[in-house]
Image (cartoon, rainbow, N blue to C red):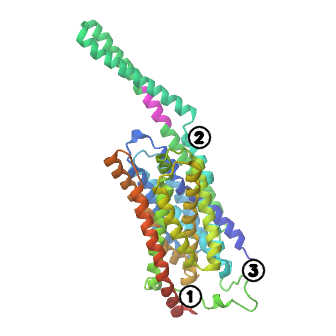
Amino acid sequence: MQNKGWVVTFAGIGINLALGVLYAWSVIKKAIPSEWGWSDADKALPYSIACIVFAVVMVPAGRLQDRIGPRWVATAGGILTGIGCIIASYAVTVLWFVIGFGVFAGAGIGLGYAAATPPAVKWFSARKTGLIAGLVVAGFGLASVYISPLANHLTGFTLTGKPVPEVVELARAEALAEKEYRTAREFADLTRAELSGFDVAIALQDVEDKDIVRKDAAAKLLALKERNIHRTLFFFGIGFLVVVTLLAQLLEAPPPGFQPADMVPGGMRAADAAAVSLGPSEILRTPLFYILWAMYAFAAGAGLMIIGNITTIAKLGKIEAGFILVALLAVGNAAGRIVAGMLSDRIGRLWTMCIIFLFQAALMIVLRTGLTDMTAFIIVSMLLGFNYGACLSVFPSAVKDNFGLKNFGINYGLVFTAWGVGGFIFPLAAGKMFETAKSSTGTGSYNTAYLTAAAVLVLASALTFAARGIEKKHKARFAGNA
């Protein structure tokens, strides 16, 4: 049979490029009008809910793609992601953003993501697991490179994050109308005390006229902001529904008994012959599952905390990089997935995990010192994205190595719930810590969040050493049952 591995791999990359809309939330939330009255924690909620729903849906989605194939699962993912963005495009409240972006789009992303990697990995031998997994998931991390500038444009911002002229003009008109209204009101108050009733009536009429102009200017600015954010989500919804649905038709798993061309003549390599093959109920009874789960939750949560708040963090250091910052972080994110995948094929999954956990912890401490230089901040952001992205290729590879390919979809879905839990808790907790700092000092700060993230990352690196002995016993117990 013709090897369709690269076709499936590139289709998976394309699907993830579309589903990576999740990482554009930091741009979208910036466009939410202040008139909606959302707190920083409110703005983090749709993103956090999307993360947890994404992760939870990965479990049934993994089971479905193992049983009925990846094509239909990815198709359903594209449809739900599109519908979710369209629902959010008509929303102005936290609740409806949570329902649209958080629940529907989150579920769609989970379905599509679950169906993209397993079929691609199955077309290649074990020695390319890290590389192929890294390439497919790199699409998800790289999505912000094009989604962020597009979101900036549609929401009324330039590539540097500054409002476009139309928004600036309306904002100036609103500010002028507000100033004139306040001046008229102050004059009316003074007139009441010093002049006759006729003059007071004229002054009060002027206040009323200025108030009408003020409210009209504010309404026009709000309408423009709302139109921009609504059209952004609507266009994303339609576009991603079409793209994912079309690319999903190219996803196909190899038939039973298929052997990649790079296996040794006469059959499977020794590493493949001794492979483990466990079902979901079996992996839940192994200690290795829980230690992988804990490490994934710590590492992914810390990374998502930064990605979801990167534009706010930049503003705290008075850095206005806008799209450039988000895009370069995405480049680091995608590069980490590919490089770490290849590195883990050579030095092992656990050593690679240990390196990226410690590196990420060190970067959190660097952030805590307060970066005000744009170049330094961009470099640190790219490295943070690199380490976060590395997790997204190393962990699926570790799941394949330790639990097998037969039930890879649902097995990785179960481990991936750690990503969702981390992605829900860390960004939400960071938002609360920011609000707490703001209420006590008057200035928001993520310093406590950085320190907390660094601590759990060091703990995760320590767990990699505990995992070595557990993994060795695990493979000795289950080897050869593929």
Q: What residue sits right under mark 3 in the picture?
A: 1
Report the residue marked by disc 1.
276
For disc 2, the marked residue is: 158
Residue 341: % across, % down: 62, 72
Of marks 1 and 2, which one's residue comes earlier in the chain?
2
* Residue at image location 76% in from the left, 77% down from the top: 2
Q: What are the residue bounds of the magenta stretch? A: 216-224
Q: Nearer the viewer, mark 3 or mark 1?
A: 1
Q: Which percent across, then down, holds residue 129? A: 64, 77
- How many residues crowd around disc 2 within 10 Å: few (fewer than 14), some, or many (20 or more)? some
Q: Is residue 342 above or below residue 256?
A: above
Q: Residue furthest front?
A: 369
Type of amino acid under label 1:
Val
In primary-sequence order, the first of circles 3 and 1 is 3
Of the residues shown, which amino acid type is indicated by label 3?
Answer: Met
Q: Secondary structure at mark 1?
A: loop
Find out whether residue 223 is within the magenta segment: yes
Q: Along the polypeptide, which appears first: circle 2 or circle 3?
A: 3
Cβ–Cβ under 8 Å for marks 1 and 2: no
Of circles 1 and 2, which is in front?
2
Q: Is residue 329 above or below residue 394?
A: above
Task: State the residue at coordinates (57%, 75%).
Answer: 352
| Residue 252 visible to an observer of this rendering | no
| Cβ atoms under marks 2 and 3 closer than 8 Å | no
Residue 154 location, quadrant: top right
Left or right position of 349 against 188:
right
